[in-house]
Amino acid sequence: MHRKTLLIIPTYDERDNVGPISEAVFRADPEAEILFVDDDSPDGTGALLDEMAAREPRLHVLHHGAKAGLGRAYVAGFKWGLERGYERLFEMDADGSHDPKEIPAFLAASETADLVLGTRYKGGIRVIDWPLNRLLLSMGAGVFVRLVTGLPVSDPTGGYKCYSAEVLRAIDLDKIVSNGYSFQMETTFSAWTQGFRIAEVPIVFLDRRLGYSKLSLGIAREAFCMVFRLAWRNRFRRRPRAVRPAPAPAPQA
């Protein structure tokens, strides 16, 4: 068992979602802890989270100030978790689209991988309640990323992920430049080019029931440009820059 597992959940106007997602996480893994990173939500999410944290020691809140974006919220959360010695750090959405029941599968995969990605597309399509145009855009983005960068994962834009602390220390969070959904590509690409082992676990993605999507044209534009920046960063090689040794076999009983 891992000594410490932290789920980092950014929030902006997610007042209706933070209670249900917290309950679902603790049902799935009673030993896990949650860090909500709130970007000064106008709907009072931050104040509600403070009330929840006062009652629940496994729940923590980081008030991140004015709305700074998804990537900056995750970077702040990762640094908070690393400073406190967590060994496995998750990304998870607040809106229920990422099912906490999958947490044990991620942790099992992390026994032999440094970064575990939830995939909506490997072995079939598992997306519920998305319009066809959004589904095709998401799937097409994954193909585009693989063709341009060589990143060998089926769902590079997905946001349900589990990092080892070693990965987050190695990729140098201060050098991550993206802030929207391209943050997912950049962090995975950085881990891959440094030779970390990446695994994928199938997940079902359910579109949000409450609240509103934060996707915008600017975020989509940033993601498109980031694909070419990543390819250039690796000098258009289609392989990692580094090769890490395989883990030593477990001692025999």
Image (cartoon, rainbow, N blue to C red):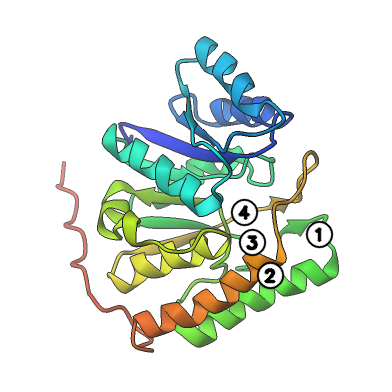
Asked if the residues shown at circle 1 and circle 2 are in contact, with their CB atoms under 8 angstroms apart, the answer is yes
Using the image, tell me which numbered label, if any, was put on residue 130. Answer: 1
Q: How crowded is mark 3: few (under 14 residues within 10 Å), some or many (20 or more)?
A: many
Q: Is mark 4 on a helix, strand or loop?
A: loop
Name the residue rendered at 75%, 74% in the picture: 136
Q: Earlier in the sequence, mark 2 or mark 3?
A: 3
Q: Are marks 3 and 1 in contact (CB under 8 Å)?
A: no
In this rendering, is residue 152 above or below 78?
Answer: below
Q: Give the Cα separation between the discs numbered 2 and 4.
A: 15 Å
**Secondary structure of the residue carrying numbered label 1:** loop
What amino acid is labelled 4 in the image? Ile
Residue 115, by quadrant, is bottom left
- Residue at image mark 3: 120
Q: Residues within 10 Å of mark 4 (few under 14, many from 20)?
A: many
Above-or-below relation of 207 to 2: below
Callout 4 touching callout 3 (CB < 8 Å) = yes
Residue 201 x %, y %: 52, 57
Residue at 64%, 32% in the rendered image:
21
Chain-order first, disc 4 or disc 1: 1
* Amino acid at circle 3: Arg
Asked which secondary structure carries label 2, the reply is helix
Q: Which amino acid does label 1 sit on?
A: Trp
Query: Which type of secondary structure does the marked residue at label 3 adopt?
Result: loop
- Could one spot residue 183 in this view of the protein? yes
Q: Which is nearer the N-term, disc 3 or disc 1?
A: 3
In this figure, which residue is indicated by the disc labeled 4?
203
Residue 114 is situated, as x and y percent measured from the top left of the image, at 33, 56
Q: Mark 2 points at which residue?
A: 138
Identify which residue is drawn at 58% across, 44% down: 67
- The answer to which of marks 4 and 3 sits earlier in the sequence is 3
Q: Which of marks 2 and 4 is nearer the N terminus?
A: 2
Q: Earlier in the sequence, mark 1 or mark 2?
A: 1
